[in-house]
Amino acid sequence: MKLLYLLPGNVRDGGLGEAEMLRRRDVLQANAFPGTVVEIADVATGPSSIESMYEEYQSVPGSVAAIVQAEKDGFDGVILGCAGDPGLDAAKEMVSIPVIGPGENSVLLAAQLGHHFSIITVMDSIVDALEHLVLKAGVDRKLASVRSVNVSVLDIGKDPDLIRRRALEEAKAARDQDRADTIVLGCMSMAFAQLDKEMSAELGIPVINPAIAALKTLEGMVAMGISQSKKAFQTPPKLLK
Amino acid sequence: MKLLYLLPGNVRDGGLGEAEMLRRRDVLQANAFPGTVVEIADVATGPSSIESMYEEYQSVPGSVAAIVQAEKDGFDGVILGCAGDPGLDAAKEMVSIPVIGPGENSVLLAAQLGHHFSIITVMDSIVDALEHLVLKAGVDRKLASVRSVNVSVLDIGKDPDLIRRRALEEAKAARDQDRADTIVLGCMSMAFAQLDKEMSAELGIPVINPAIAALKTLEGMVAMGISQSKKAFQTPPKLLK
Amino acid sequence: MKLLYLLPGNVRDGGLGEAEMLRRRDVLQANAFPGTVVEIADVATGPSSIESMYEEYQSVPGSVAAIVQAEKDGFDGVILGCAGDPGLDAAKEMVSIPVIGPGENSVLLAAQLGHHFSIITVMDSIVDALEHLVLKAGVDRKLASVRSVNVSVLDIGKDPDLIRRRALEEAKAARDQDRADTIVLGCMSMAFAQLDKEMSAELGIPVINPAIAALKTLEGMVAMGISQSKKAFQTPPKLLK
Amino acid sequence: MKLLYLLPGNVRDGGLGEAEMLRRRDVLQANAFPGTVVEIADVATGPSSIESMYEEYQSVPGSVAAIVQAEKDGFDGVILGCAGDPGLDAAKEMVSIPVIGPGENSVLLAAQLGHHFSIITVMDSIVDALEHLVLKAGVDRKLASVRSVNVSVLDIGKDPDLIRRRALEEAKAARDQDRADTIVLGCMSMAFAQLDKEMSAELGIPVINPAIAALKTLEGMVAMGISQSKKAFQTPPKLLK
Amino acid sequence: MKLLYLLPGNVRDGGLGEAEMLRRRDVLQANAFPGTVVEIADVATGPSSIESMYEEYQSVPGSVAAIVQAEKDGFDGVILGCAGDPGLDAAKEMVSIPVIGPGENSVLLAAQLGHHFSIITVMDSIVDALEHLVLKAGVDRKLASVRSVNVSVLDIGKDPDLIRRRALEEAKAARDQDRADTIVLGCMSMAFAQLDKEMSAELGIPVINPAIAALKTLEGMVAMGISQSKKAFQTPPKLLK
Amino acid sequence: MKLLYLLPGNVRDGGLGEAEMLRRRDVLQANAFPGTVVEIADVATGPSSIESMYEEYQSVPGSVAAIVQAEKDGFDGVILGCAGDPGLDAAKEMVSIPVIGPGENSVLLAAQLGHHFSIITVMDSIVDALEHLVLKAGVDRKLASVRSVNVSVLDIGKDPDLIRRRALEEAKAARDQDRADTIVLGCMSMAFAQLDKEMSAELGIPVINPAIAALKTLEGMVAMGISQSKKAFQTPPKLLK
């Protein structure tokens, strides 16, 4: 199967650069089942990073267009590569191939692994938005907390140790003060810094990498021949060609 | 006070035309308290009508830019003139003046008028999105149902009797089968067709006109000097100038 | 329009005295839109202050009778002037003009301004009652906390600085410990001490004055010609004349 | 132990008359455990029947005064004899002996007997009030429906067959259409018509008699030496003597 | 009436021994209404103590068989003597006589006595299971917290002072930090150590003894001739003889 | 990776026979990713079919023992092959390898595919148990309905057309009357009759096969090196060796 990991921002010419894009593709490919090919793309019209609802919305027209094109280009499924799932319902409306929102997917997985999960994200400005994501996903009763490291996405690359240390601090606080028994990394920069194994070993509880978890769920959906319900995500008649 | 009613779609050159825009402005002005001036604008880059999440997202970048400009131009508050409140949280992030989402505002008013409210909207494709709006607004326990008339926005103008008859049919069903004691018109074309008084007289229960209700709430907020919480809707640091 | 602000206790001869009643009328009138006349009245059979459910119930027969009389006297709407909304549903049953409960109205407004609101009230003995009010209003998922200053209503007048200082302390605790992004003053003595502007400036988040907010909502309802649903608040057949 | 069953309306000189009061006392006494003495009283200042929130509130000042007196007179506990539990929280505030609300008590018992319960009550005008009672009791997730027979309390005595037939009809509809597996009689006239055994035999599911269930819970509480929490139901300091 | 208190573990030859079993029978008998006879039994195939879901499940086949036999032996009702209610729904399916789960019964009683209750239990490993019990009982909105003393069941007997002191410490923390106004003892060893009266006197709030509360509810149900709904707890056709 | 699909009943010598077991193994193997080996086993001490909570509990001691042994035998993960997930939490307590409950896993997947899902199961007697499963999984707000075909598990094999026709009928009713946009097969006999593709084509909405979905999720978890949280599912100290 051929899958697209779509970065809904301007990565190549914006913050992170093409080398980081290719490195992320390699991380995903290395985690794929035999027979899966993962390609990666970004959205040139998108923001350079996403730390607010404003930036989420800025990314959507371009990323949905890219997902529509991906279906035409024969991809079997798409991962919308941002933990806030910007425009996920619009993307699900416009294509028939499965589209995974790594935020939604991770919190539903967390609900299966434990009773109380916490999300560790980048900035305070996105905490309420992630709470709404969990509410819409339906598992808000199992949400222990959303905590932010308050390190901007574009600063994460500058000091990898800082994000590693801060993420672990907040995850420990989530475990010890908020009763979290499961952690979700709520940011793709943390995901591709591959902090999950190290943090899990340190914390003694599961830590979900949203990028890898999205990949495994998408591979499963494609293998099962299953996708989002078109009764739930209707393509409006006037947009059908 | 000076208020902006922003149509988040391309109305002038799209479906409805400038005359309808001016008529809507007049309806709002006629319903304003003394001292209030209402101006109206549309978003040229927006869709011609909104009946899906896809179209909601298409409207957002242009409408948020228009709201940011409105604050600079000295408006005291803005109504985001679509019952689905597209991009409302982004708009609240980006300005300090109050921004009203007519959908959110109407369902909170409905929760004050009765115990069980129903929303009557245009198309089946937008029903689940309105349920999510109610969930996010927080009054989902009082939602009796969302019912659609299944008449496209752009067809409403063509046959005013059709929408009048269908809206009344669905509202009666909401009252008699779903236990609704209060009705919210979940579409601005219904709002500006001013169906609310006639329907309320026929049904014997309150019918909320989301355009007028938004105006009255906004006038109240401006008069009180109150606006959305900037702790809840943070402007991301990098976007502050 | 002509509106009645009804104090459901014995204010003239009880705690606060007629001068305070007249001052409150002036505060309301000064906050009204052009064309609105606000009158004020108290309930001679009511308690001198309300800090328990017992006192709430004591106030109801007299205040509902006064509201029924107000409708006969041509008032266009009534504010039931206590943040606990004592007997609100009974009042809504017995008249057709809109009756505003400042508690219910303020928490629904708070749900529109932010994601997590806290109520600051007078005494611990009324905290659970306010939580029930929020539950019945339907926005309990957005309630961060109810905090009390533990200063009795009748002591508020004696030491205005005490209530000012204590209200600010508890609101800060709500913001910093309970995650409140919006504050509701849950007591009419705080409302008419007009602490809201000063507190909001100090806290950096909106503070809702329940008296003024009730006035603006009532003016909006009267202007729209809308009132509580008589399907939700039925007048029992035997009480219809 | 000595228990008071308090009718919160004017029964002796109002609707039902003293003979009915004495008959009810006998029904309760016949259902008591050995050693329990049940006395009965009404509230002369209360309404002749309760089918609205307005009438509920009318009953409260008199019934709470009677309950305060009962404690002074040495009663070990009180049943507030109306399925709407009017003023229950005020009564719990003002005395230390246990006070049972038959509505609250019955729905909590129903939650123990099955998964989905329905309440059968007298008039449509009280349906929403009973839903609020269930919400406040905390078991709203288990509420299948509240159905009314639409027979006025004072007409129940005139045609015992009518109420018997209508209650059974609505209970069958609750079982077959609303998935109820347990029925609560939501009216004391139905309770003392002792419809429960006959209905249960006919329906094949438990039917809770709120009067008898209240008696058994109160006997249990008195035997255990347990009562409502005075932290939850605080007597306001100024009312403590 | 003749009631069985069934210990779902191996008590006689396991941890506690026959003398403790007989002492518990005497405690229950001493708390029974006149005319009630309480017998006690254990389950030889059950675990020696229950501090995990694994042990809960181990106890079920034996205890359900014992309850089926109790019905045949003419018992009028059974108490499943563990605060975790292991296999309660299976027991309710297999017999017509009422079966009380002391956990479920206590939390529903707590919901009647106050607004916020806490459960004090033995081990951290059972905390989440008790939260699920409360969720299934339906009163999760009233749950303040579940706190454990972290003393193993089999160690309770060795140092009665330890459990007394630790239970009081955790209950005070529940009252002062978690806002509990009512306490449920979530362990039968605490129940039969009869800590409730002493703790309640110390704390100033009600403390529910689950063993005695179960007895009083069961006596009430048997007296009313009421039992679990067989529509809610269906005996599968193939198991009907 | 090496995975065990454990049938928690006596299949070989009970209802279905060894040939059916082997056929099921082949179905799973055919759906596995390259590199996955699926073995199958049953529980000789378990019931011949599971249509009640009683039978669920009967299966648990044997199936948990088998899962503990599977971990010792080097399996990388286990599927507890019954849609009711009997004893799932006990199994998660006793091993470190991931254990999938196909019921829990399917409803969390359904929550990702749509907004409202229905479960189609075998017998009315298991409907409430599946509702509790959904409540515990946390996605009850998205549950449209649980519907049963009322065909006993052991009769499914006798008339494959009956179950096919009845499942489709109930799924259509779920879609058209209960608003389901996604269907979960709530029975392993339906899963291995592989009704999902055919039903989905007929209904136009996704139909989840719980056996295959469990396999894909388990393969994903093993590949990610992730398992249930041992903080959420603690092994009690005395059971640690």
Image: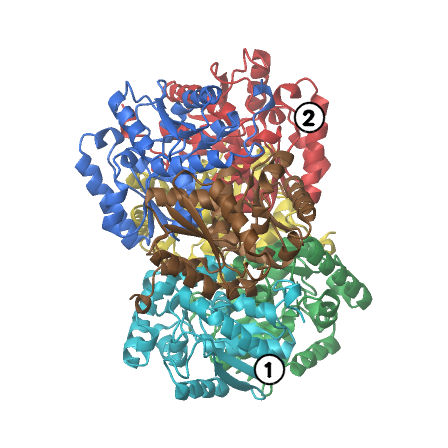
Chain colours: A blue, B red, C yellow, D green, E cyan, F brown
Identity of the amino acid at label 2?
Ile
Which of the 4 image quadrants contains residue E176? bottom left
**In the displayed structure, does residue B45 sit left or right of residue D110?**
left
Query: Residue, x 68% and y 51% (percent of image)?
Result: C235
Indicate the position of residue F240 as horizontal and vertical percent values: 30, 65
Dot 2 falls on a residue whose secondary structure is helix
Residue B239 higher or lower than E143, as above or below: above
Q: Nearer the viewer, residue F234 or D221?
A: F234
Res. B66 visible in picture: yes
Query: Which residue is identified by label 2?
Result: B163
Indicate the position of residue F164 as horizontal and vertical percent values: 66, 45
Identity of the amino acid at label 1?
Phe
Which of the 4 image quadrants contains residue F48? bottom right
Q: How many marks?
A: 2
Query: Residue, x 55% and y 79% (percent of image)?
Result: D219
Mark number, residue B108: none
Q: Alpha-carbon distance for marks 1 and 2?
A: 66 Å
Looking at the rendered image, the quarter that the C terminus of chain D falls into is bottom left
Q: Nearer the viewer, residue F177 or F20?
A: F20
Residue C55 higher or lower than E227, as above or below: above
Looking at the rendered image, the quarter that the N terminus of chain D falls into is bottom right
Res. C123 visible in picture: no
Dot 1 falls on a residue whose secondary structure is loop
Q: Mark 1 Cα within 10 Å, few/some/many (few <14, many 20+)?
A: some
Indicate the position of residue D5 as horizontal and vertical percent values: 61, 76
**In the displayed structure, does residue E230 sit left or right of residue B74?**
right
Query: Which residue is identified by label 1?
Result: E75
